[in-house]
Structures are given as C-alpha cells and as structure tokens.
Amino acid sequence: MDIREILRQVRAGESDWQIHKAVGVNRRTIKKYREWAQREGLLSGPLPPIEALEKRLQQSFPETPPPHQQSTLEAYRELVEQLHGQGVSGKVIWQRVQEQGYLGSIGAVYRFLKHLKQPPPGSDAVVRVERAPGEEAQVDFGYAGYMLDEQGRRRKAWCFVMTLSWSRHSYVEFVFDQRVETWLELHRRAFEFFGGVPRKIVTDNLKAAIVRACWEGTDPQVQWAYRECAEHYGFLIGPCRPATPQHKGKVERGVGYVKDNCLAGRGELRLSEANPLARDWCLTTAGLRIHGTTKQQPLVQFTETEQSILLPLPTQPYEQAIWKEAKVGRDCYVTFENAYYSVPFRLVGQTVRVRGSQRELRIFTLDFEVVATHSRASAPGIRSTHHDHLPPYKLPGLLWNADFVLAMASRIGPATRLTVERLLDDRVVDPLPKVRRLLQLVDSCGEERLEAACQRALAHDDPAYMTVKRILAQRLDESTMPSLPLPTTVATTFARTPDELVEHVYAGGTSWR
C-alpha cells in the first residue's frame, strides 16, 4: 500500500523530496519505484487494484533475494533427526556427528535443533466453537485456598464452577472435598439455581466423573453414579481428552476469576459465609459485567433467552447412589462406606459391583445380576447379614445363641425348655456346645422321645446332656415312671429324697444310674 501511495503521488507530479516528507520512505527508494513505474507504464491510466499491483511487483521488480545460508549440519540431517527423535541431548548429538567428521560448533547443532522443533505453519491454529442457547454447560473444579469450617478449623477448599456456554452465566460453590457424593450434589444445586438443565455437560477427567480417561484408542469410562444422574436429569456427559483444557475454555478461567474477584481481599472466610457470597456475586458482579468475548451481560442473556430453552427439572431431585467395585472377602462380606454387607458365599474372592443409595444397598455381579439387597447401614462398623448367604455348615456357630436354643427347645416341649434353661445356668463353662448337642438328639430320636427323656432327667434332678443321651440309648424314656412334678427351681443342696435313693430302674439287668 505504501508503494501504491508512492505511485499515486508520482502521478500527481510530486517530487521525490515531497513524497519522502509525506510517506517517510527514502528518496532513493522512491526514485527506484518511479523508474519501475515508467517502465511498466503505470504513470498514466487507472492504477491497478492492490492485489494486481502486488502480483506485478513480484513478477517484474528487480529485487535481489537474500542469500540462503545452509546449515553445516545439513549433510548429517538424517543422523541428527534420528538421535533427536530418540531424545538424545544436543551435546551428545554434537559428539556423535563429530565422530562422523563434522567440524562445526555446538552452537550450530543447537540452532539446527531449534529449526527442527519449529511447528509447521498453521499447526497451532485453533477453531472457536460456539454453542446454541441451552445446548451446553462446562464444569470445573479448582483449588480456592483455605477456608474455615463450622468448628473454625482451617481446611483446603475447592471451587466448583458451572458455566452455560452460550450466555456465560455461572454457578459457583465452595466445598471441602471432591467426592462423588459432593460432585452429584453440586450438579443438583446448580440445575436448581439455573431453573433447568443444559443438554450436555462438558467436564474434565476428575475421578468423581470419569473413572478412566479417553486416551487414544479407548473410550472414557464414566462413574456409574454420574451416569444415573445424567439419565435422571436428561443431559449428556462430554468428557474432554486428557491435557486439553482448551476444550472447556469457557469455564477454564472461571476458578481464577472467582479467586481474583469474588474472594480477593476478603481473607479466610467460613464456608458458610463464602457460599452465600458466591451466589450473590454470580447474580451481580459476574452476571452483570460485560463479558470479554460475547460483549453482553451474562445474566441478561440468560434470563431473556437461555433460561426458557433449558430442559425442565424433573419432579423429584436425583437420589444419590454411589457405585463402586469391591472384592468379596473370605468372611462373605463386602465393605462399603466402612460398613459390612453379606454376599452369597459362592462369590468369595470375586469382584462385585455395589450400588448404595441413601436407603438401600444392592450388590451385583459384573454381569449385573442382583445377588444381594440390604438396608443401608446407619453408621460405620455395622454388619448387615442374610444368613442364607453364609455356608450352611458354618451357620450353627453363628445362630446357636441363648435366645435361639430356648426358642427351639420351646417348640419341642416344656421339659426340653426347662432342661436347656438349667444347662444355660452354668456360669463357668460355656453351655452352648452341650445345649446344641442335646437339641441335635432330635435328629436321631425325634421330638417326642427327647421330651420324655428330658422329663425323666428333670424328675431325678439331673438335666445333663450325658444323662439324657443315656436315657435315650437305653430306651428308658419308653418305660413307665412314677408321676413326678417337674422341679420349678434349681436345687440348692445335694440332698436326695428317700424315694430317689432306693429307686432302681433296670434295663437288661443293669442299672441306668
């Protein structure tokens, strides 16, 4: 354009000095272009347009190109590129090419490598992607510094920002952790703040959202709880590829803006103070500013256009459900949130999927077959057990307690229950093994005979397991015995009545005593 101005002033009859004063170009340069214009016939008639003049200059103007300086390493290019691709340092590359006869300096090597590292023209070009109203929101978690909890303790706080991609209206909240439960609850509150749901949420690869990132050749693995949340609200999850923060550039600066503006100069706030402050800041300072890209006020854009286009909120908020994979221990339990839940013993050593909601916990195989359902434990350390999950041959050691054996004895008869009560009075040796063996006699003799044997043992004030067993073995329970009232209290002495001392019952010629 300067050359075209020179030609225009030459055609107007201006001298080289006048053109120099007006354009600021050296007079020798002006003379050179005047002579070129005369040769090309450009001093009369209409001036060609700027693009035609540029093409004519390139074709006919006598300009000597600058000399091309070829690197002294050009003869060793293949070797240098190979070593550089292997990560070899410039100094070592210099030593290797010297072994091949290179006489140049190490500086020439570094200049050559710098030229190799230059990206091809246009390789750093980007394309700005704009979204339609209600189409997308971008979320980010960032460190917000220290804040105080309700007890006044200093804790690291994190800033959650959700920004609507079209209007740039944002929701901000501070939390003390990045757990899955927190992540889901933040989404619920953000949607309620906006009064609707965008059709897609773009997120990075934090563990609360993405279990496995989208590397080359693989698909991202989304947290099951986040999948359920997305299904409940109707939005799609759009995880970024690793190390590509520019893919959510509309929110990427959000955390820094919150720290530099909303929190700046306020000291260490309590979390309970910071969140109302952030909410008000979103509706005033951040919402009413002129956005640097859109040149519009985010809150005005949101209320006038975007809010009505968002997906409606469901009638009920999402009930949080946390998914995890767990290995079934040898004791037939899995651990979830520091509580223990039984699983069928056939799955010992296998990995299962656990879904825990606020009221219920369900356990699945990896093929999503439901194998157990429990009520959610109210506190850590609680053990929830379904007895049919345990090996049958291990159940007696778990089930046979005092209440269980008394209930079982009651079903057999009053004499059996009284015998069990007398056995349970032992305060020195654990009585449950003897009681269990006593009640298991039902398997061989039946309830009627066991009840009769216990009645005979009680009549003689000897309700011992071996006594009942001998009565059954010698079939003494089937013989007639004088009617004796069952004792109602435990004997306090070793005294015996005369009848007890002289009574002998023989079976096969031998006394059962």
Image: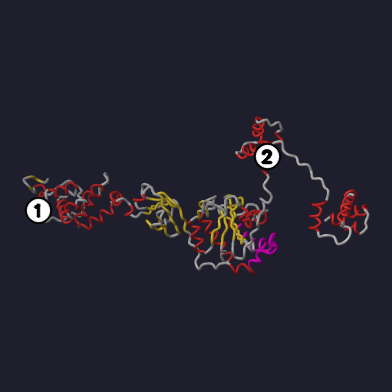
Tag shown at residue 113: 2
Mark before the other along the chain sequence, 2 or 1: 2
Q: Quadrant of residue 414?
A: bottom left
| Amino acid identity at mark 1 | Ser
Q: Is 282 within the magenta?
A: yes
Q: Nearer the viewer, mark 2 or mark 1?
A: 2
Q: Which residue is mark 1?
A: 479
Where residue 486 appears, as percent x and y from the top left, is 17, 55
- Residue 234 x %, y %: 52, 64
* Magenta residues, start to end: 273-302
Q: Nearer the viewer, residue 147 or 82?
A: 82
Residue type at tag 2: Leu
Residue at left offset 28%, top offset 49%: 393
Residue 138 or residue 356, whichever sits in front? 138
Left or right? Give the position of 420 relative to 285: left
Secondary structure of residue under mark 2: helix
Q: Quadrant of residue 478?
A: bottom left
* Magenta part, dominant SS: helix
Horizontal side of 312 relative to 342 (left or right) equals right
- CA separation, marks 2 and 1? 110 Å
Left or right: 286 in relation to 348:
right
Q: Residue at coordinates 47% horizontally, 58% vertically from top-left?
A: 321
